[in-house]
Image: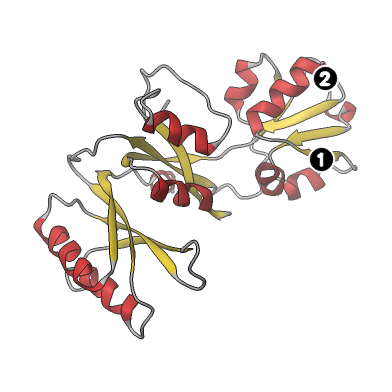
Amino acid sequence: MALFPEAEMAPCATFDEVFEAVAQGACDHGVVPVENSLAGSIHRNYDLLLQHDLYIVGEHNLRVSHCLIAHPGVRLEEIKRIYSHPQALAQCEHSLRALGRHIETIPAHDTAGSVRLIAERGERDAAAIASARAAKVYQMAILREGLEDEKNNYTRFIALGREPVTPQGEAKTSLVFAGRNEPGLLFRCLSAFALRNIDLSKIESRPVRGVPWEYFFYLDFIGSLAEERCQRALDQLREMATFVRVFGSYPRARAAWVEEE
């Protein structure tokens, strides 16, 4: 909703389905998470970026705030079970322990789906951990807000499209590269950006399938390929790497945590 407020939403059961829906033209754009500030990268989506001929056209940093949700009229002391995605349960571990009594935690496929589950089953002795929006959608009640242990918890989402965009204003570029396994290769590749004072905001390595101990390097940098210095950095990288693919330049998301501070 933050990236495409006027769009008609089309939910998918898996990340693979999101990529397929965009690649096949069933949807104009897709939105998937790529990293969390606490749990790290969602590796599956890095792999899917490489497998599909799509572009990154935007990003959004979402503040993760978990709520404890149950049927209207249910009191906290009545709750015996709590459903949610394993990541959400882990992110609320200390808060759940602070409730002062043992409550069974049950992993589920997703957070909002956990709310739907207890709503459809009519489980009045169960609760779910999800967003405030999920409680509103399924007409449930919020027992506790801000259940997450770490308040500086953000997930970065990217928007996918079939065509690249040319961003206006502050931009970010994402790419992947690989090279021969030889001393100093990574240093030389990254120097293409360091020499031009280009800020690298992320670097992530992923295995090359079928080639043990060889890696792809996923890279994000601040800037657009419309800038000459960024284009020259990419040209230099191509001289040293055996494989380079650019996922696109796109508008850089605002750093919400800095504004909150």
For the question of whether residue 143 can be seen, the reply is: no
Compared to 29, does 185 lie above or below? below
* Residue at 70% over, 49% down: 90
Left or right: 190 as drawn, with respect to 84: left
Split into 4 quadrants, where in the image is the N terminus?
A: top left
* Residue at 39% over, 64% down: 217
* Residue at 68% over, 35% down: 109
Residue at the limit of the structure toward the left, as seen here: 228
Secondary structure of residue under mark 1: strand
Where's residue 232, x and y in %? 13, 63
Compared to 197, does 224 lie above or below? above
Secondary structure of residue under mark 2: loop
Disc 1 marks which amino acid?
A: Thr
Left or right: 249 as drawn, with respect to 106: left
Q: Nearer the viewer, residue 75 or 222?
A: 222
Q: Residues within 10 Å of mark 1 (few under 14, many from 20)?
A: some
The residue to which callout 1 is attached is 105
Which mark, residue 74? 2
Where's residue 48, x and y in %? 45, 46
Q: Nearer the viewer, residue 43 or 226?
A: 43
Q: Nearer the viewer, residue 35 or 236?
A: 236
For the question of whether residue 204 can be seen, the reply is: yes
Where's residue 112, x and y in %? 64, 28
Left or right: 205 as drawn, with respect to 95: left
Marks 2 and 1, the one that precedes in the sequence:
2
Q: What is the spatial separation of the Cα atoms under label 2 and label 1, in whole angstroms?
A: 18 Å
Compared to 114, does 153 lie above or below? below
Which mark, residue 32? none
Where's residue 14, x and y in %? 56, 35
